[in-house]
């Protein structure tokens, strides 16, 4: 079996696989690229994880995730900023260890409303302040901070950035190679401005990563676990993929799925099914050269 050369699977899709097992599963399934998650790296230790990642020969598509800096100034915010600094350094280290054309992209989930707050405007302003503080360090490390807008149902607890327009407006003061955006079909499929904002993101050179998974109802009780394989829901992957391709984006396309049934399935089966659904729902709309070519 050989996965599409532009397909990357985020290891969160096989959540329970230890770090080295997740790399082996993807290699066995013919993948060339992987999106890594910070927690498994931390469990193994950055030095050892970097060595094993380098030995795998896989390409890095993204490192997930950091951000979470919407709180007011104080000890918790300083701790968050410091954690983002560590994440920037980890991204640079892992990207340097990956196969050629690895991308030093750190996905940022902004954070929700601070406890007891109803101040959306203030929370979003503090994101801008955090980016201003972190952008010089990201630039020096050669890392792109990829702001990920999340579906509005997560605005209170995970991300007060809900649209690509909001993400692009936050990124605008910075060089595109330093602050970009994550285009994730699960989070933006509902937005009537999504196609126009994808075009804008391409024009501004800010598409740091393209992520695909599907939306289906009814949603589970834990809406965080509501993602599906491409093609198993209602999202029009043709429209979104063609829009991203039209911008000239030719990087990896990452599948990241949070779904308890998928997490409980055998890892090799998930890797195979991910590749099959990608080939059916996304690959037919790709026109640009493979990411690893």
Image (cartoon, helix red, strand yellow):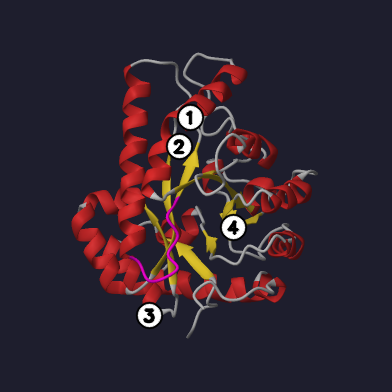
Relative image position of residue 176 (x, y in whole percent) = 57, 46
Q: Given this view, does label 4 or label 3 mark the residue nearer the observer?
A: 4
Relative image position of residue 172 (x, y in whole percent) = 62, 37
SS assignment at label 4: strand
Question: Which residue position holds label 1?
Answer: 132
Question: Which residue position holds label 4?
Answer: 210
Q: Which residues are magenta?
A: 98-105
Question: Which residue position holds label 3?
Answer: 28
Position of 100 relative to 124 (above/below): below
SS assignment at label 1: helix
Instruction: Residue 104: say if magenta.
Output: yes
Tell me, yes or no, whether the two marked residues, 2 and 1, touch with CB atoms within 8 Å.
yes
* Separation of residues labelled 2 and 4 (CA atoms): 21 Å
* Separation of residues labelled 4 and 1 (CA atoms): 24 Å
Judge the density around disc 1: few (<14), some (14-19), many (≥20) Cα neighbours within 10 Å: some
In front of the other: 270 or 169: 169
Tell me the tag on residue 135.
Answer: 2
State the residue at coordinates (53%, 66%).
Answer: 252
State the residue at coordinates (68%, 54%).
Answer: 202
């Amino acid at each position: 079996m050989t996965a599409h050369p532009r397909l990357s699977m985020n290891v969160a899709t096989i959540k329970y696989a230890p770090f080295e097992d997740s790399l082996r599963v993807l290699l066995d399934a013919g993948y060339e690229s992987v999106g890594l998650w910070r927690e498994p790296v931390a469990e193994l230790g950055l030095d050892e994880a970097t060595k094993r990642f380098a030995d795998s020969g896989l390409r890095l598509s993204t490192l997930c995730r950091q951000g979470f800096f919407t709180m007011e100034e104080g000890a918790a915010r300083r701790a968050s900023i410091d954690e983002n600094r560590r994440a920037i350094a980890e991204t640079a280290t892992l990207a340097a260890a990956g196969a050629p054309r690895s991308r030093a992209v750190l996905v940022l989930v902004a954070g929700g409303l601070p406890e007891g707050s109803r101040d959306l405007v203030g929370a979003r302003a503090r994101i801008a302040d955090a980016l201003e503080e972190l952008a010089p360090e990201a630039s020096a490390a050669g890392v792109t901070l990829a702001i990920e807008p999340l579906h509005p149902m997560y605005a209170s607890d995970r991300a007060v950035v809900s649209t690509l327009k909001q993400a692009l407006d936050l990124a605008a003061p910075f060089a595109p190679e330093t602050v970009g955006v994550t285009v994730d079909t699960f989070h933006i499929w509902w937005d009537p401005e999504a196609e126009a904002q994808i075009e804008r993101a391409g024009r501004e050179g800010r598409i740091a990563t393209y992520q695909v998974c599907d939306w289906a109802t009814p949603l589970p009780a834990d809406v965080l676990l509501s993602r599906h394989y491409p093609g198993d829901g209602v999202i029009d992957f043709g429209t979104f993929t063609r829009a991203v391709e039209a911008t000239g984006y030719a990087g990896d396309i990452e599948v990241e799925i949070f779904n308890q049934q998928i997490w409980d399935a055998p890892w090799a089966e998930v890797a195979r099914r991910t590749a099959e659904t990608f080939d059916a729902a996304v690959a037919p709309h790709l026109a640009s050269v493979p990411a690893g070519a």
